[in-house]
Amino acid sequence: MGSKINFYSENQFQLKNSQAHLQWIERVMESEGKRWEELSYIFCDDEYLLNINMQYLDHDTYTDIITFDYTIGNALQGEIYISTERVVENALKYNVNFEDELRRVLVHGILHLCGYKDKTEDDAKLMRQKEEEKMQLFHVEQ
């Protein structure tokens, strides 16, 4: 029985350099002393994620990411839903390129699975620091 990380798409989005992203996600987990059991990223549009937000979290708002955490101990398990439409909007809003914003959101979900929160100002500040730190671990072999 092997551990696995899956990328699914409920819209037209296809993750570029998926192997590099897999290796990066593994480095992020290892840097936090975690291992993965089963992790699924589901890329979708705003409406898809809004429906999940309303149905499961009772929030009637658009968001870029929702993480469902099924982690047991240090074995990370979860489903991470990402609205690629929100990622595009946020990249424009924060004046960063799409790939960097996507990686920020990808790692944000992992950090939630590792136990980091972002509801209070102090928690959000630590989350941002961790996002920046973990994004530095990404590199594509040339």
Image (cartoon, rainbow, N blue to C red):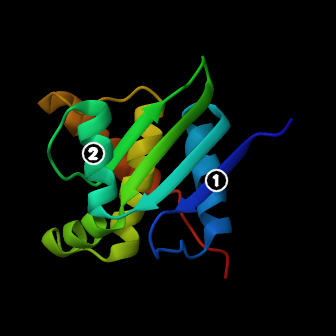
Q: Quadrant of residue 141?
A: bottom right
Lower sequence index among marks 1 and 2: 1
Q: Nearer the viewer, residue 3 or 44?
A: 44
Q: CA distance from mark 1 to mark 2?
A: 25 Å
Residue 136 visible to an observer of this rendering: no
Q: Quadrant of the N terminus?
A: top right
Q: Nearer the viewer, mark 1 or mark 2?
A: 1
Residue 87 spot, x, y in % from top left: 29, 66
Seen in the picture, residue 133 relative to 126 is either above or below; the reply is below
Q: Secondary structure at mark 1?
A: strand
Seen in the picture, residue 4 relative to 139 is either above or below; the reply is above
Q: Secondary structure at mark 2?
A: helix
Residue 107 spot, x, y in % from top left: 44, 49
Pointers 1 and 2 in contact (C-beta within 8 Å): no
Residue 40's disc is none
Residue 128's disc is 2
Residue 81 spot, x, y in % from top left: 42, 50
Q: Is residue 136 left or right of residue 5?
A: left
Q: Nearer the viewer, residue 28 or 65?
A: 65
Q: Is residue 135 left or right of residue 74?
A: left
Residue 6's disc is 1
Q: Amino acid at mark 1?
A: Asn
Residue, x 34% and y 75% (percent of image)?
98
Seen in the picture, residue 19 relative to 82 is either above or below; the reply is below
Q: Quadrant of the C terminus?
A: bottom right
Residue 137 spot, x, y in % from top left: 53, 56
Q: Amino acid at mark 2?
A: Arg
Residue, x 51% and y 41% (percent of image)?
79
Q: Quadrant of residue 55?
A: top left
Residue, x 64% and y 48% (percent of image)?
26
Residue 39 visible to an observer of this rendering: yes
